[in-house]
């Protein structure tokens, strides 16, 4: 199937990663952060000081205790970091550097059935890699999804190139796809650009779709909407390609091997390269050979949806990149650099800066300044230009703000996730935190209707 | 700039140090954020943001209004000296200065009255001053007749900001265009001052009575000053519908107000509205920067053109026989189309809705203008009606989307 996404916006930020593999350190410290999973209330299964192996369950979902979250390394549970009201923010594991596996006996799943596979994935802590739409949370094990989606490319700013990351990993990828096929009666959809790497083009047992068009064409939400839209009561699962590799390695060898390659990019870093690392690694291990400029923000994830982390923080569970962008915490005089400047170096999706006349390939400096203050909704038609869904974004957001669940359902909240609104948030003249609003709406719908 | 920054920082500090003065922060904040884009940074979600903000958006609209303002100033002076039959004796500068003396006080009063209300509400409700009024404050004087008394403008502006906007919750929440609310207020509260033949040309009402009579009698017969020289073109046209038209037929009208004069704007009327050319320059800027909706502008024009053509085909009197394109160049049609109908808050919000909304505005505007016994102009009322209908139009468009989704559910 060929899809063309017309509405959208490519944001060309300075500091894209070069396709070079660099060497970081192997992290000594790892963390699992319950905060990476929206709506999750964790229940601890280990205590500080316990010895764990790769694949040992660290905590589980309190309301669905089949779902385990496993240690990506072997060693000792170092610390359970708690925040307000003793909420668990992270569990850190001090690695012994050996990566001893809890399990190393592969099973032949072709001879087993779906429920066996499910219970093994849940036990091994591989389940959280599967996420579902609607609500955009970890897939519910009891569901039977109508299809499973994998986006084979990322169109976000500074995004990693999966063609580069996945190169020559066909065996693991196909093994992972085989497992995914067992989880649905429908299709497994794999979306790529038309000139994708062989690992995608030669993937087996999948429906291959090529996608054309600007960001958010790489977002799985856009692809689901165009290929197999979700109606009320239906469920679609999705998974990241690198996580399919983890599934594949499990299928082939029986181990929980959470190795992944991440991209490091952004203007604030000296090494804009790809790094081999492990899920949950400490940021400092990845950045050990790299200098970070003064007054910069480190993000686990991309600049549109990522999460602020400290230098002694950890890579997010679903993240495949680290972005380092300058902070914008200074006043800008209105004529030279501020709101009324000519702005020959400023990027805007609106045409109010002359840079819209320049070629699209030009890259721009970005910082974290809001470039204005939060205001009421005034400008209309702005979100619609970058929102390729057959959904009214502003009206949906207004229904969320007013807690009108019936209207949210009618306007299509089951099809969206916060990341689908990232561009709306980016272009918003009134600087409204749209993604946050959408998350709140999804949480409300989840609580009330599911 | 560090010096200026220091002043603002000190002012903030001083205000914040005292509980009683704390609530006055909008006063400093408004000027601070005018001079400096604040140091607010993103927290989560999208960590980088587009360079546009509401201030720039509003400022671009004001810049788009500058041609209308400048021409309005000139034309105010021009009409004044035309009535006095002194055009040949005065220089360009004198004409412009005369206009400026009339128009600029209106601008100052409009901004002063409106911003006063805005600041009071901001302090009362503890929020920063939003930029919405920056444009309204410029639109209000431009849609006023030249000779409107300043106190009326002040009252109308305050009425519009309080009743038209703040009671609904402030910028972004209003259902009626603020500037048109101000104009409508004056139109209905002070009809004698807002219509008729005496208010459109500055200095004209002073000439009434003997002075005027002597002027008329002493003037040449070249028709520069005649019995209706203070009236607008639409006033003359409306008289076709009455028993004693001012002009004998459409040709006489076209001779008096040629299409070119109407297009360029050398005719009496509200200050900013007369020149279709200047409105189009403003429209070009607004469309080029993507701020005004091309959907609204194009459908508004089509709506007006369709209605004018229909009535033109009906014909039967001097008014209806005026060609549609000439009709659209008169009065506030172009100005309303470019600057009033496109107000994103009060227009329809959905893209499909904008087409319907614009068409409705243009269509009704010409209908009200041409087929009613009371008002010589209908654009203001038509846009206000379209404003009121905009949420309904949006509702229809959204319901259509909802039904489509439900249908997909049923077929799936």
Image (cartoon, coloured by chain):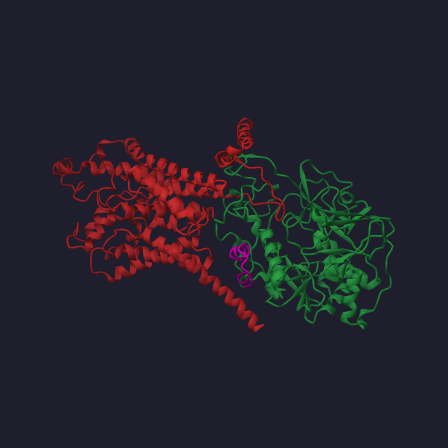
Can you give x and y, in whole percent of width and height, for residue A439 in the image?
61, 55
Count of number-bearing discs: 0
- Magenta stretch, main secondary structure class: helix
The quarter of the rendered structure image containing the C terminus of chain A is bottom right
Q: Which of A158 and B40 is in front in this view?
A: B40
Read off the magenta span. Answer: A394-409
In this rendering, is residue B387 above or below B66? Answer: below
**Is A407 within the magenta?**
yes
> Which chain appears green?
A
Can you give x and y, in whole percent of width and height, for residue A35 in the image?
70, 51
Can you give x and y, in whole percent of width and height, for residue B388 in the image?
38, 56
Determine the colour of chain B. Answer: red
Rendered image quadrant of residue B208: top left
Can you give x and y, in whole percent of width and height, for residue A203 in the image?
73, 64
Rendered image quadrant of residue A234: bottom right
Rendered image quadrant of residue A420: bottom right
Is residue A326 visible in this depiction of the protein?
A: yes
């Amino acid at each position: 199937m060929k899809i063309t996404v017309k509405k959208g916006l490519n944001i060309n930020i300075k500091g894209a990663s070069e396709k070079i593999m660099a060497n970081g350190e192997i992290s000594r410290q790892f963390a699992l952060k319950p905060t990476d999973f929206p709506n999750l209330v964790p229940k601890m299964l280990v205590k500080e000081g316990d010895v764990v192996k790769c694949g040992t369950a660290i905590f589980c979902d309190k309301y669905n205790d089949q779902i385990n979250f496993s240690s990506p390394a072997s060693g000792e549970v170092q610390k359970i970091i708690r925040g307000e009201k003793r909420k668990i923010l992270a569990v850190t594991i001090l690695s012994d550097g050996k990566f001893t596996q809890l399990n190393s006996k592969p099973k032949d799943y072709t001879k087993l059935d779906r429920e066996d596979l499910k219970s093994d994935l849940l036990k091994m802590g591989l389940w959280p890699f599967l996420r579902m739409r609607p609500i955009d949370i970890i897939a519910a094990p009891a569901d039977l999804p109508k299809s499973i989606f994998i986006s084979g490319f990322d169109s976000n700013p500074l995004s990693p190139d999966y063609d580069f990351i996945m190169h020559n990993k066909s065996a693991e990828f196909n093994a992972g796809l085989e497992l995914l096929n067992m989880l649905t009666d429908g299709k497994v959809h794999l979306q790529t650009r038309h000139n994708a790497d062989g690992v995608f083009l030669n993937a087996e047992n999948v429906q291959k779709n090529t996608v054309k068009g600007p960001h958010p064409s790489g977002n799985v939400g856009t692809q689901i909407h165009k290929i197999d839209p979700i109606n009320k009561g239906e469920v679609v699962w999705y998974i990241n390609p690198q996580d399919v590799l983890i599934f594949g390695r499990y299928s082939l060898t029986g181990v929980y091997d959470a190795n992944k390659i991440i991209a490091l990019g952004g203007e604030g870093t000296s090494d804009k390269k790809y790094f081999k690392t492990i899920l949950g690694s400490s940021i400092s291990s990845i950045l050990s050979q790299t200098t970070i400029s003064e007054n910069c923000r480190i993000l686990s994830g991309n600049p549109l949806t990522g999460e602020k982390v400290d230098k002694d923080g950890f890579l997010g569970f679903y993240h495949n990149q680290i972005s380092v962008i300058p902070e914008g915490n200074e006043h800008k005089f209105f004529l030279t650099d501020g709101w009324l400047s000519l702005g020959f170096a400023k990027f805007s999706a609106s045409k109010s800066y002359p840079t819209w006349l320049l070629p699209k390939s030009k890259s721009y400096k970005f910082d974290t300044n809001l470039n204005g203050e939060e205001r009421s909704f005034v400008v209309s038609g702005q979100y619609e230009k970058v929102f390729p869904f057959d959904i009214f974004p502003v009206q949906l957001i207004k229904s969320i703000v007013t807690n009108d669940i019936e209207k949210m359902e009618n306007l299509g909240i089951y099809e969206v996730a916060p990341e689908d609104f990232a561009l709306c948030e980016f272009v918003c003249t009134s600087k409204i935190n749209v993604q946050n609003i959408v998350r709140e709406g999804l949480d409300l719908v989840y609580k009330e209707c599911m | 700039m560090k010096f200026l920054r220091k002043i603002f920082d000190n002012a903030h500090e001083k205000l914040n140090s005292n509980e009683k003065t704390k609530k006055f922060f909008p006063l400093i904040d408004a000027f601070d954020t005018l001079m400096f884009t604040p140091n607010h940074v993103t927290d989560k979600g999208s960590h980088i943001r587009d360079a546009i903000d509401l201030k720039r958006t509003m400022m671009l609209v004001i810049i788009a209004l500058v041609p209308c303002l400048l021409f309005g100033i000139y034309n105010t002076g021009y009409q004044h000296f035309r009535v006095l039959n002194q055009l040949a004796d005065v220089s360009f500068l004198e004409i412009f200065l005369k206009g400026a003396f009339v128009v600029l006080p209106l601008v100052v009063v409009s901004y002063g009255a409106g911003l006063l209300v805005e600041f009071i509400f901001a302090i009362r409700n503890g929020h920063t001053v939003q930029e919405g009024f920056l444009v309204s404050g410029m639109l209000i004087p431009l849609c006023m007749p030249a000779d409107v008394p300043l106190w009326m403008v002040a009252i109308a502006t305050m009425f519009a900001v309080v009743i038209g906007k703040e009671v609904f919750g402030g910028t972004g929440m209003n259902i009626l265009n603020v500037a048109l609310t101000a104009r409508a207020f004056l139109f209905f509260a002070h009809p004698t001052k807002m219509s008729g033949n005496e208010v459109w040309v500055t200095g004209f009402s002073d000439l009434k009575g003997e002075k005027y009579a002597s002027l008329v009698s002493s003037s040449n017969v070249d028709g520069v000053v005649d019995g209706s020289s203070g009236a607008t073109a639409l006033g003359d046209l409306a008289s076709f519908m009455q028993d004693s038209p001012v002009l004998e037929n459409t040709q006489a009208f076209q001779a008096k107000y040629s299409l070119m004069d109407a297009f360029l704007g050398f005719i009496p009327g509200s200050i900013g509205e007369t020149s279709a050319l200047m409105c189009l320059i403003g429209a070009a800027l607004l469309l080029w920067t993507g701020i005004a909706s091309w959907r609204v502008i194009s459908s508004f024009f089509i709506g007006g053109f369709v209605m004018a053509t229909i009535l033109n085909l009906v014909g039967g009197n001097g008014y209806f026989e005026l060609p549609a394109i000439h009709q659209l160049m008169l009065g506030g049609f172009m100005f309303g189309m470019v600057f009033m109908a496109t107000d994103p808050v009060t227009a329809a919000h959905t893209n499909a809705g904008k087409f319907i909304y614009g068409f409705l505005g243009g269509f009704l505007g010409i209908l009200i203008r041409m087929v009613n016994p009371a008002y010589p102009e209908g654009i203001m009322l038509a846009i206000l009606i379209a404003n009121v209908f905009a949420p309904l139009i949006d509702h229809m468009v959204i319901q259509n989307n909802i039904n489509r989704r439900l249908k997909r559910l049923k077929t799936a």
